[in-house]
Amino acid sequence: MTTNRLQHELKKKHPFESPEQEATLNIIRTNDQFQNRFGRLFREHGLTSSQYNVLRILRGEGKPMPCLDIAERMVQVVPAMTGLIDRLEKQGLVRRDRCTEDRRVIFIELTDKGAGLLHQLDEPVMELHRNLIGHLSQTELKELSRLLEKCRLSVSGVFD
Amino acid sequence: MTTNRLQHELKKKHPFESPEQEATLNIIRTNDQFQNRFGRLFREHGLTSSQYNVLRILRGEGKPMPCLDIAERMVQVVPAMTGLIDRLEKQGLVRRDRCTEDRRVIFIELTDKGAGLLHQLDEPVMELHRNLIGHLSQTELKELSRLLEKCRLSVSGVFD
DNA sequence: CGACGATAGTTTACATGTAATATATTCTCC
DNA sequence: GGAGAATATATTACATGTAAACTATCGTCG
């Protein structure tokens, strides 16, 4: 009855020790494969997944944002932002603006070029989403989201 | 009715464009948070997630394995293996053995020290699994695994 | 037997994630 | 008003993932 698909993919000789372990590995492996696919798409346009993520966040906000606010919406730790913004700025996709009131704060602003690149990616990204999980029914997608959100309850509970 | 938990976590102003996008982002975010937790545990023992993964694969196989066979069971691309093995070897957790028949092949072997470290991690790892998703019922865990495996059907179909 | 293609690993260059530390500013409180 | 805590970024060191190019072997086929 059990598919054992993951076990087969990993060429594991022994079955999983627990459904918990199996589910965790399924999350990790699915994520890796999806990230690979999206990474490939973004790379064709000179971006990495993280860089695309920053641009998306800036567009969603609709106005310049401080570094920390951007970092907060990504899972990442703060220090990585500096280099990330550096490279985006070098490509002319964002601009740094030091805030005049609080000189510690640096606002990151999406440039026209950045917005244009984002727009250019909208359709391919949506299509990839459809290609990757379009074969799941709406009910399954909702159930999947529900279960994953339930998974994360433990994380926020223990730490944050 | 919809929880909107992810939307809230990401401080998104706009709702998701599609259930597909929402599910994909849920996968990515859950994975990131879980990886963070496991990464922290492994780091306490001087390992990274990838390094632990290599050791687990070697133990599961029960005998020395060529580099490529190990890489195949991870999602990673080949070149990363070299440095990974380098660092594990430097820590004395694995050993390199050049095959005498086919001198291109290099067997990676788990050392006693590596096996000991793995054994030491078994209980903490299982406990973390329980902490992270132990609050899901057995039915939910199975359904989650089923849905994630169904997600991956598209990937293997199009590419591999 | 000798060139050629395939295979196993390595090297290099670059973007990233993590931790620890440093720097510039601002805030707070006596 | 100034010392010290808190905040926003940056810097550095290291492990990793990706792509592309390189090396060493092996196999095969003429």
Image (spheres, coloured by chain):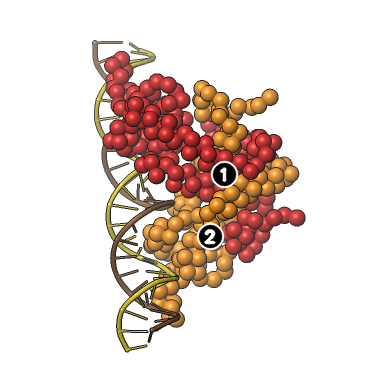
Chain colours: A red, B orange, C yellow, D brown
Circle 2 — which element?
helix
In the image, is residue A10 above or below residue A24? below
Counting from the top left corner in percent of width and height, residue A21 is at 63, 50
Q: Which of B46 and A27 lies nearest the eye of the viewer?
A: A27
Q: Is residue B109 left or right of residue C11?
A: right
On the image, which quarter does residue B99 sit in? bottom left
Disc 2 to disc 1, how far (Cα)? 21 Å
Q: Which residue is mark 1?
A: A132
What chain does mark 2 sit on?
A: B
**Mark 2 or 1, closer to the camera:** 1
State the residue at coordinates (44%, 29%): A57
Q: Which residue is mark 2?
A: B73
In the image, is residue B95 above or below residue A116? below
Counting from the top left corner in percent of width and height, residue A43 is at 40, 44
Label pair 2/1, CB-CB below 8 angstroms: no
Q: Is residue B158 visible?
A: yes
